[in-house]
Image: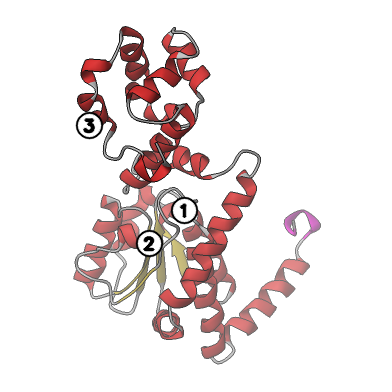
Amino acid sequence: MTKSQSPSGFLSDLITQNAARLTGSDTRLLDVLVKDPLRAALENGKEVSNRAGVHPAAAVRLAKRLGFEGYPEFRAYLQASLVEEGNDFENPAARMAARLVCAEEGRVLASVLDSEIAALEALRNAVSDGDIRNFSETLRGARKVFIFGRGHAASLSALIALRLQRSGYDAADLGDRTHHFAEMLNMLSPDDVVWLLAFRSPSQQIRDANDIAFQRGAKRLALTDLQAARLDPMPDHQICAARGEAGESQSLVVPMTIANAVILDLAGIDDGKSLKSLEAFKAFRQSLPARWQR
């Protein structure tokens, strides 16, 4: 059977179609495969057979009964199913396994680099300078900026807050103060900005912050990936960019690059406020005892 003639469809369908031909060993193998498809997509036939407690050649015989030339082709089918069928990849183990099956042995770093480069190249056409300027102009006029991200976005939230503070803006990382969530958002006014960060799906806390900011009349910015794009009510300005395809590394470099571009553009339009503040901060830090300069 050629590659173009390889079986297609779900594994359950292949099992049903070939049920009359399956042996006891086949059943034990399939039980192992179905219970842990992530591991099955990574292992060779001998490893799967060992886990099932059957002869090493049993996996090859099963693959042929299901219509494949051999176990390598069957394994490629399992890998393709993992990458192509699980489009949401909500299970962290599934996301990790999908990235592993996309990386050739000994090329994990290269695979991650390829994925990051592809995501950054796609960013060129996905986000415009106008999108960046909308963010920076909104930040420039803010009395106070509240940045909020959960999960992986929390690290970027902290970095944005730090950079804005050094640039002379009154910025607070809500992700670092969730135990004071009510107190912090109670201070919101129409002169403030809430910058939300959401990857994969907005948490309920992100949705709550968006609702409260809307009710208080504060400006709302949202930096999201494609899967977290929908926020209701819609933010005043939103930048939405893919962080990688299914089975690829879900880049944190992409949103960080966007945030860096916003802060750089802000420095270019705030009449020297950012540059003066950065110089003042540098001088202040150098005046501190050495133990505080690390």
The verdict on residue 46 being magenta is no
Residue highlighted by disc 2: 225
Residue 161 shows in the view? no
Residue 259 location, x and y as percent? Answer: 50, 70
Q: Amino acid at mark 1?
A: Gln
Q: Secondary structure beneath disc 3?
A: helix
Q: Amino acid at mark 2?
A: Asp
Observer-side mark, 2 or 3, equals 3
Depth check: 49 or 265 in front?
A: 49
Q: In the current view of this chain or complex, which residue is farthest to the front?
A: 1
Tell whether label 2 touches label 1 (CB within 8 Å): yes
Give the SS element for disc 2.
Answer: loop
User: Which residue does the numbered mark 3 point to in the structure image?
Assistant: 13
| Image: magenta residue range | 289-293
* Residue denoted by label 1: 250
Q: Residue at x 26, y 16 (%)?
A: 21
Q: Residue at x 45, y 34 (%)?
A: 73
For the N terminus, give its image quadrant.
top left
| Residue shown at 37% from the left, 20% from the top | 62
